[in-house]
Amino acid sequence: MDLKPVVLCGPSGVGKSTFIKKLLQDYKDVFDLSISHTSRKPRKGEIDGREYHFVSREEINKGILDGEFIEHAEFSNNIYGTSKKAIRDIQKTGKICILDIDVQGVKQLKNLGDKHFAPIYIFIMPPDMKTLEERLRARKTDSEEAIIKRLNTAEQEIKYAKEPGNFDAVIKNDDFDKAYSQFLDCLKETINEAGRLKLKV
Ligand code: 5GP
């Protein structure tokens, strides 16, 4: 049985990567993160092949035309996408694949239909827009224009997440420990299933 991939979505700055980092520390034999491609320039401390495959827009566009991407999106003047290879490489190791993507990507994956790709969809919600804005500013990674763009996108994403049925779980990140424990609850069945499969080997 294929283990369900996990799609983590939520506004830029909401703290998705903190959830993923902790999950990969706590369950390093169970999960692995799909490394996306992006035309965005690396931020300080980001390494090519670790946070993203940092490539040109042309390279991603070519890959999309060649059918190499399962989904892609234009976000804040850059293009982002998940290659089929990124997912396959993780599935080959027997681990569960985690995708950190935006709402445009979520919609595309849903359009593929459950037969092709049936993940658990989780949305991380900021406590409120003011806190999200403070977090984006505190990162000091984006220009004023980019921050405003990200906040506008966040409003749209939150609206989509609030519509019933779009996500399997919506978790408010007001207290990280509490939110992380809710996150683990959503993954409990998958983690248990992964454990059972390991025992059988
Ligand atoms: P950032 O520039 O802050 O790393 O990411 C901006 C947004 O792009 C985040 O919301 C992130 O989840 C999303 N993102 C990252 N990789 C992908 C991807 O491969 N596909 C899609 N659709 N969104 C992505």
Image: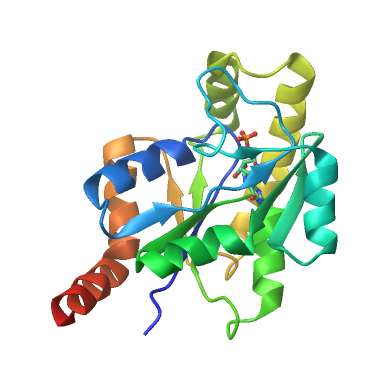
In the picture provided, is 81 more to the left or to the right than 161?
right
Residue drawn at point x = 35 percent, y = 64 percent: 95
Colouring rule applied to residues: rainbow
Horizontal and vertical percent position of residue 72? 73, 55
| Displayed quadrant of residue 29 | bottom left
In the picture provided, is 118 more to the left or to the right than 106?
left
Position above or below: 185 against 199: above
Could you say which is closer to the camera, residue 90 or residue 125? 90
Q: How many marks?
A: 0
Residue drawn at point x = 85 percent, y = 62 percent: 65
Residue drawn at point x = 43 percent, y = 51 percent: 171
In the picture provided, is 42 more to the left or to the right than 139?
right
Could you say which is closer to the camera, residue 156 or residue 68? 68
Position of the N terminus by quadrant: bottom left
Position above or below: 7 against 60: below
Horizontal and vertical percent position of residue 59? 80, 46
Horizontal and vertical percent position of residue 121? 51, 63
Position of the C terminus by quadrant: bottom left
Residue drawn at point x = 34 percent, y = 53 percent: 183
Residue at the outermost left position: 199
Horizontal and vertical percent position of residue 164? 58, 67
| Displayed quadrant of residue 152 | top right
Q: Quadrant of ligand 1?
A: top right
Position above or below: 124 against 15: below
Could you say which is closer to the camera, residue 145 or residue 173? 145
